[in-house]
Image (cartoon, coloured by chain):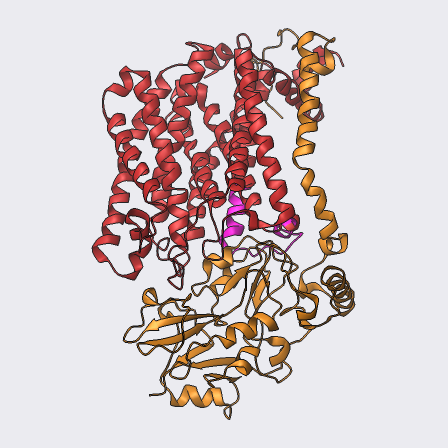
Chain colours: A red, B orange
Amino acid sequence: MSQSRLYTTDAQTAERHVETYPRFLLWALGVATDGSLWFYTWMFALTAIFLVGANAWAVQVADGMIVTHMTDHVSWGLYIANFTFAVGVAAGGVMMVIPAYLYNNKKMHDVVIVGELLAIAAIVMCLMFVTADLGRPDRFWHLIPGLGRFNFPLSMLTWDVLVLNGYLLLNLHICGYLLYMRYLGRRPNPKWYVPFVMVSIFWAISIHTVTAFLYCGLGGRPFWNSALLAPRFLASAFVSGPAFIIVTLLILRRIVGEGISYQPIRVLVNIVRVTTVVNLVMVVSEVFTEFYTGGAHTAPARYLFFGLHGHDALVPWIWTAVVANVIAAVLFLSPWVFRRAEVLVIACVLAFLAAWIEKGMGLIVPGFVPSTLHEIVEYRPSLTEWKVTAGVWAFGLMIYTIGLKAAITVFARGDVQDATESAE
Amino acid sequence: MTESSPHDNLDRQPIGPLLPIVNNGPSRRNVMKGIGLTLGLAAFGKAVWPLTAVPENVSLDEFLQKHYKELTEKDKEHVFTRLENEAREDYGADVAITDHRPIPGVKFGYAINLSKCNGNGKCVEACHRENNHDRATNQSYIRVLEMQKGSMDMEQGNTTYDHTVPQDDKYYMPVQCLQCDNPPCVTVCPVEATWKEDDGIVVVDYNWCIGCRYCEAACPYHARRFNWQTPEIPADEVNPEQSYLSNRIRSAGVMEKCHFCLHRTREGRLPACLEACPTGARVFGDLNDPESDIVWILKNKRVFVLKEELGTRPSLFYFFDS
């Protein structure tokens, strides 16, 4: 087809978009797989890790979940731990959307797509982790509303299916539309994305709230059965999400240069300064309630922090998280984060790692130890579980990288940015 | 789409090539990309090759099978025959799978006399054999807690005791599915693969369960079990008398649980664990029948249920004689 047809804007019809949108996606995929030697090395490494994970998962499906180290006592492990954490990362992206759209922060507006792309990658990871955890992935269709039997609204898992997929679609639409319009060299029409962005803000809160409700609604699991669980989830998500984005932006500044403004990083650090403290206050509040009360109800917390009757597999994990959390909080609150990029990166990495432990293994496993009949069976992930987990992370990072690459190329094309700014 | 506006940049140069592999000549980079893509796809195919074992285990009929409640009588006949054939092929056992439905008006209840139970574990073994459990893991729906006299605290209990019973300072408490009237496991199931039947028994459609194990997390009594691998049972040990919703051989990756031996009790017989109990600690019957032993016990003994504060309203009760 002739290229000029792309720009017959006055007569532009929906049919035209049906043709040009797939072309745009194809083009984006093309530019997103072009890069330097560093880029190819990075993607090659991710592909290799992903393939190891895919193979481990295939073996797990063929041989049964026995290849994991989960048991009837600890029936959820590393997969659900990572799922929970990844939901937080997806929700954390909203901390860019709020300043950009609710507070009309122009500089944040320019890079908000970084947060939305992170949400897409993280949700894809969530769906992969849940699938990896299913004993019968071949019966996946039983979960599809209309086709299977969807136990809505009683089962919180059905709510999670809806909110996670909804959040994925929302962000796919927002990113897709904005990049597509810039690709066409046109000003995005607010009507086609601003309402979706507003919905996505509340939706981001809902994905992590519903995921917390999965656990905190279970009366038989005292460790999870706390009203503070959902707020704690959100607080830590609003640390780990922005921390990841800050590091992304710093890397992008290295690659793209000063085109990426420092101002959004400053905003994100200021957000994390608040959320990290809120998170710590909630942790202290929960820990106090557990340990001051005592009794059987607090056995999981005792197991987590100090070990129970000689069983202490999680103790090193959780203290690593506690120390990392405190150091990260101190660094974020100090003036050095704005003076030295290394300090900021260290703070972000520590905060991210701490949330990964605390909202991952540190949250899921103590729910099962001791068991509901107060037996203590410990859990350490098997090599298969580590491989699958690494594979999913690698795949998520691949999606994120490709998304960012496409976005950078689109934004770098000529005068588009100027056109947008003058329009606003 | 109505976004046409004066801001539209109509004079832009045509956009560069689409996916370069498709539109460009064979530049060095594109050749490399093509090779990389081919190698990547080949490696992916190799990586997921173990999945090719799945169609051997999951027939198309099984894949497309509907939920138990949606099966017609004819469907059931078809499904049961298929399952019988699978038992013959996979286990070398001739089994008969039937469909026991609740007896109208009956509501089952169970009571265990903790003064009589001495922890001998015969019920655990009987369940293991009756319900075609995996031999390798010695699976059973019943766990017996050895409890410290003077305490109801399960944290001081022990399920892995290995010494002569009864010990003087201990008492023994068997735990299995309590068939709650308000079952948390049923509420959380995302696909309605588990439900409560009219006679109070909570059942699982093993062919509908997706294996997410949410019910196992929700159960406050450790009553549910997951098939971490395909059960191993020697042909001569398979219990051939089977029911679709109870003791038929389960596949890997699905949940299972105690069903009060519905293939026996819905025929008017007693659960296998009760028949095996040498101490007479177990009492089973119809809660709706005022003449039944179970109703007499509920009226005349001081019974209690496990974790009553959770509001699960169990149908399995415990009591002491003295």
**Where in the figure is residue A123, as x and y percent of width and height?**
52, 36
Q: Is residue A345 left or right of residue A166?
A: left
Is A150 above or below relative to B175?
above
Q: Is residue A158 left or right of residue B302?
A: right
Q: Quadrant of residue B45?
A: top right
Viewer-nearest residue: B259 or B66: B259
Viewer-nearest residue: B233 or A30: B233
Q: Which residues are magenta?
A: A140-165
Among all residues in the image, which is located at the extreme left? Answer: A292
What residue appears at the point 32 percent right and 21 percent down from the top-left corner?
Answer: A344
Q: Is residue A276 left or right of residue A139?
A: left
Among all residues in the image, which is located at the extreme front? Answer: B164
- Residue A160 shown in magenta: yes
Viewer-nearest residue: B220 or A242: B220
Viewer-nearest residue: B274 or B204: B274
Confirm whether residue A137 shows in the render: no
- Residue A87 shown in magenta: no
**Where in the figure is residue A314, as x and y percent of width and height?**
36, 45
Is B297 above or below relative to B221?
below
**Where in the figure is residue A88, as x and y percent of width and height?**
42, 38
